[in-house]
Image: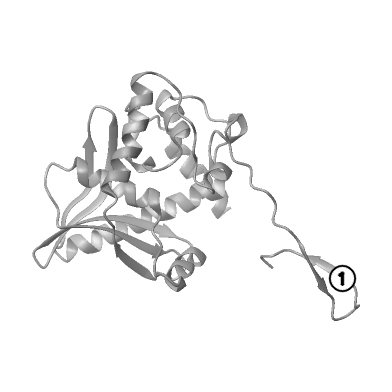
Amino acid sequence: MIAKTINEYIADQRAVERKKSGKFSVGDAGRCHLMRYWKRQEKPTTDEPDERAFRVFQVGHIFHEWIQDILAKKGLLMRKEFGVEDEHRKGILDAVCLYEDKTILYDFKTVHSRKFHYMRNAETGVPQDMHYCLQVLTYEAMLPFPVDSVRLAYISKDDLCIEEIEVPDLHMEMEDDWQKLITCWTYQQEPIAKPMDWECGYCSYRSGCEQKVIKEPKPRKKKDSLLSGKSLEVKDDL
């Protein structure tokens, strides 16, 4: 009953039609150009997320509000849910804080614990999610005031572990990403998709996209069973 009630509540919220901006979403920076182009065109989607995915999205919103509330009560929050907009782009950043005389632009990313601890245990430290980096750098470029630091704060939804990283200098990549997309829009020419390797499986347009990337199934290895002595096929990720 509880799950059904939550699903109905989220569906009711989504049913409230939001005014379309007619612009690219800053939150999609670095992602598939074709998806972003179709989204701005308001092309009908073919594959919407399921109810579980919408519940997960809602949890992310709750975490963001909780963190913003704590920062405000501690007197660190300068701006929250601050809107930025230009001719082609529109977005809402999470927070700008003042900490020890340093102005910090934050973007919060709630992730599941497997991703979080994989990042933490990586040999090279926390790997950069390119699209997240380009997103927060776009917010920085569109702000009407300068900041001293641009950061991503990863929060594990399962155990509340937090990893805060300084976003590297990827301003040229950010500008290139937007320039190519905006040029295609200006000339009304559909761009080449170029999705990241994980994107197509979650894309709301995947069923009708001829450019989608289809992942090949992982090869199966043969392993001797200790019980029967016969060779068994097992997946790499077991």
Give the residue pinned by disc 1: 231
Callout 1 crowding tier (Cα within 10 Å): few <14, some 14–19, many ≥20: few
Question: Who's the residue at 88% across and 80% down the image?
Answer: 227
Task: Indicate whether 93 appears above or below 36.
Answer: below
Front-most of residues 77 and 90: 90
Question: Who's the residue at 44% across and 71% down the image?
Answer: 159
Question: Who's the residue at 73% across and 58% down the image?
Answer: 219
Task: Indicate whether 223 appears above or below 102.
Answer: below
| Residue 94 appears left or right of 194 | left
**Residue 118 in picture, x, y percent from top left:** 49, 68
**Residue 184 in picture, x, y percent from top left:** 38, 25
- Amino acid found under the numbered disc labelled 1: Ser
Residue 105 falls in which quadrant of the image? bottom left
Front-most of residues 224 and 44: 224
Residue 88 falls in which quadrant of the image? top left
| Residue 3 appears left or right of 223 | left
Q: Residue furthest top?
A: 187
Front-most of residues 85 and 192: 192
Q: Quadrant of the C terminus?
A: bottom right
**Residue 31 in picture, x, y percent from top left:** 43, 42
Q: Residue furthest bottom?
A: 226
